[in-house]
């Protein structure tokens, strides 16, 4: 099997899904094997607003902010990530002639995760730590790489929603960037492309003239310090991918024509071993 390219497209507002899908179709026509992982944050927010469920977050003692996924929010997350975003992306790629196959990490135990049954969080009203026990988020521990290889060898382009399965067979909300990193490592991919709605890592966010073109592994701590909140998660995912053997992680802009091919050609921020 030829080298696999793993692409993550963000689920936030501003991402140009049409450009991403057109570029994926061009790569597929040229025989490139690609796995697409997507986010769902904007779709979950819209659905939550529509049904009157407020968006809530948890802030860890270290400052990391994540979506609070209680049982009610988990249902909305499944509907938005798997039922809306995944299906629409798969249909759009099919319309472009790509034999896309939509699935989540629950299907075939594609992504097995450990549920975070007790999460430490900062209470925003008091500033004190509290324990949250009804959060259905997880940390991915295992990727079913054999399933992905089977699909790729059969000519499919897997489109993966950021849901995993727990040891108790519960669906879990997982971070899409870290899921893409784990998939890239499991498949032995040389390159992971993470597409978002900015040009890459910006030294002075949101000033796009401050784009950082290259971050070697030794400078990742400094990159984390300069990154804004959303980009910090992508830098952490890139670090996990690099430490797992991926040669380069490209943080690039989805808003331009041929965003994936432009990233491969040097646009955006390249995170590498050296």
Image (cartoon, rainbow, N blue to C red):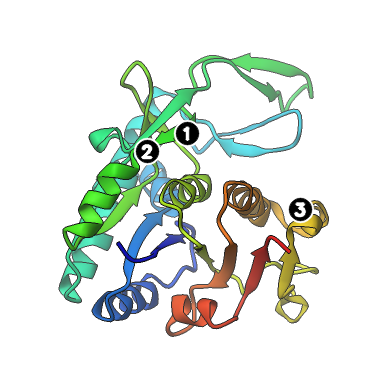
Quadrant where the image shows the N terminus: bottom left
Which quarter of the picture shows residue 50?
top left
**Looking at the image, is mark 2 or mark 1 earlier in the sequence?**
1
Residue appearing at x 23%, y 60% in the figure:
90
Per the image, label 2 sits on a secondary structure element best described as strand
Residue 236 vs 78, above or below: the answer is below
Measure the alpha-carbon separation of dots 3 and 1: 22 Å
Per the image, label 1 sits on a secondary structure element best described as strand
> Camera-side residue: 111 or 13?
111
Q: Residues within 10 Å of mark 3 (few under 14, many from 20)?
A: some
Measure the alpha-carbon separation of dots 2 and 1: 10 Å
Give the number of the disc on residue 190.
Answer: none
Q: Which residue matches tag 1?
A: 140
The answer to whether residue 216 of the structure is visible from this angle is yes
Which quarter of the picture shows residue 108?
top left
Q: Which residue matches tag 3?
A: 224
Question: Is 54 left, or right, of 223 in this rendering?
Answer: left
> Camera-side residue: 161 or 107?
107
Q: Residues within 10 Å of mark 1 (few under 14, many from 20)?
A: many
Per the image, label 3 sits on a secondary structure element best described as helix
Which quarter of the picture shows residue 60?
top right
Q: Position of residue 175 (x, y in %)?
A: 50, 42
**Looking at the image, is mark 3 or mark 2 earlier in the sequence?**
2
Circles 2 and 1 in contact, beta carbons < 8 Å: no
**Looking at the image, is mark 3 or mark 1 earlier in the sequence?**
1
Q: Residues within 10 Å of mark 2 (few under 14, many from 20)?
A: many
The answer to whether residue 80 of the structure is visible from this angle is no
Q: Which residue matches tag 2?
A: 163
- Mark 3 or 1, closer to the camera: 1
């Amino acid at each position: 099997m030829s080298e696999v390219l793993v692409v993550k497209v963000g689920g936030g507002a501003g991402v140009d899904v049409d450009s991403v899908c057109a570029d994926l179709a061009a790569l597929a026509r040229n025989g490139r094997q690609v796995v697409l992982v997507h986010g769902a944050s904007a779709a979950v927010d819209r659905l939550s607003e529509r049904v009157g469920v407020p968006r809530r977050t948890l802030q860890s003692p270290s400052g990391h902010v994540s979506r609070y996924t209680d049982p009610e929010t988990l249902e909305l997350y499944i509907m938005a990530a798997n039922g809306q975003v995944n299906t629409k992306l798969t249909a759009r790629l099919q319309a472009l002639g790509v034999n896309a196959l939509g699935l989540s990490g629950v299907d075939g135990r594609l992504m097995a995760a450990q549920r975070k049954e007790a999460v430490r969080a900062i209470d925003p009203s008091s500033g004190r730590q509290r324990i949250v026990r009804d959060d259905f988020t997880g940390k991915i521990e295992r990727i079913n790489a054999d399933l992905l290889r089977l699909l790729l060898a059969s000519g499919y382009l897997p489109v993966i929603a950021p849901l995993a399965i727990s040891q108790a067979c519960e669906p879990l909300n997982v971070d899409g960037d870290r899921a893409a990193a784990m998939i890239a490592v499991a498949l032995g991919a040389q390159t992971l492309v993470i597409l978002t709605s900015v040009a890459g890592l910006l030294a002075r966010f949101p000033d796009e003239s401050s784009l950082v073109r290259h971050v070697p592994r030794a400078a990742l701590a400094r990159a984390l310090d300069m990154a804004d909140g959303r980009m910090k998660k992508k830098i952490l995912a890139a670090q996990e991918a690099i430490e797992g053997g991926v040669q380069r992680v490209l943080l690039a802009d989805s808003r331009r024509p041929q965003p994936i091919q432009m990233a491969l050609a040097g646009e955006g921020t390249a995170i590498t071993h050296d």
